[in-house]
Image (cartoon, grey):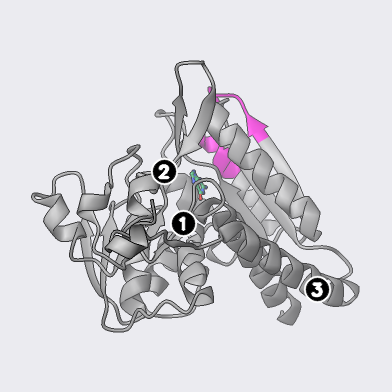
Amino acid sequence: MNFSKIGMETKTAKLLDGKALAEKIHQELIDTITELQPLKGRPPGLAVLMVGDNPASAAYVRNKERACAKVGIASAGKHFPTEVNGRELEAVIQALNEDERVDGILVQLPLPSHLDAVRLLNTIAPEKDADGLHPVNMGRLMRGELGLRSCTPAGVMRLLQEYDIPLKGKQAVVLGRSILVGKPQALMLLEADATVTIAHSKSENLATITKNADILIAAVGRNGLITADMVKQGAVVVDVGMNRVTDQGGNSRLVGDVDFESVASVAEFITPVPGGVGPMTVAMLLQNTVTSYKRFLKS
Ligand code: GUN
């Protein structure tokens, strides 16, 4: 049946293609590194610390190391057993802070519960904080100063910018209040002159809040949380969720927080999962590492 003839045309949102944009950023980084490497006499270096054997973390770390290799960043993976003690990790981070071949250091989260993640992140030198999670860099974001920015929210901002999504004066709703995404995301949207609301698991009347959003960022970690009835017609929907689900046949796949099929019929733009925000997080990690590499060029 031709629905458009009877006014029932179903619209499909345009994709915000994070995979394609990440490829473009990788190419820009390759060009920068090719230009700077003869001056520096070494490639950029990223140290990746991982503790334990959480399979999701191991997959993220593999992805990051693969992306480093692709653009010409030397990555040094440091894998520790679950039982490693905090003092040992602090000593490793301090040595990396002093190591002139290392421009960026990241500690893959989450960490086992006996380790104090805040204390370890605080040990990283702020100028080598490739993940932008050190309190100094978070503070700089809060104050609107230059600094290394958290990768996932920075990746979301870069994606919105690439597609010329207007933010000034718009209603932006961030679902989730984590240090990794929700809080820095809200600050970055505020910096771009959006009117920002942060909602979370204790928020009442969630659908009323989300329905008001011109830009909706879902970063909760709950499969299918956002359905079409919670989304304003013409909204821009960014799905930060990465939830692994297993179907009845035992096959596992990655899904976001947004019910893609239904929401794509009301939104103007939407990110896919996978291929939306995930590749942008990695691209921003590489970009932060190259930013630090450039900074050390001057010293
Ligand atoms: N765990 C899940 N996402 C991230 C991230 O972006 N950085 C770190 N360090 N850990 C994570």
Of 46 and 183, the residue lying toward us: 183
> Residue 256 — which label?
2
What is the C-alpha distance between the residues marked 3 and 2?
33 Å
Pointer 2 local density, CA inside 10 Å: few below 14, some 14–19, many at least 20:
many
Amino acid type, label 3: Asp
- Tell whether position 21 is magenta: no
Q: Are marks 1 and 2 in contact (CB under 8 Å)?
A: yes
Q: Which residue is mark 1?
A: 271
Chain part drawn in magenta? 79-91
Name the quadrant containing residue 222. Answer: top left
Q: Amino acid at mark 1?
A: Thr
Marks 1 & 3, CB-CB < 8 Å contact:
no
Left or right of 135, for residue 91 = right
Residue 210 image position (x, y, % from top left): 21, 58
Relative side of 143 to 158, left or right: left
Q: Is 139 placed left or right of 124 in the picture?
A: left
Tell me the SS state at disc 2. Answer: loop
Q: Is residue 84 magenta?
A: yes
* Residue denoted by label 3: 31
Q: Residues within 10 Å of mark 1 (few under 14, many from 20)?
A: many
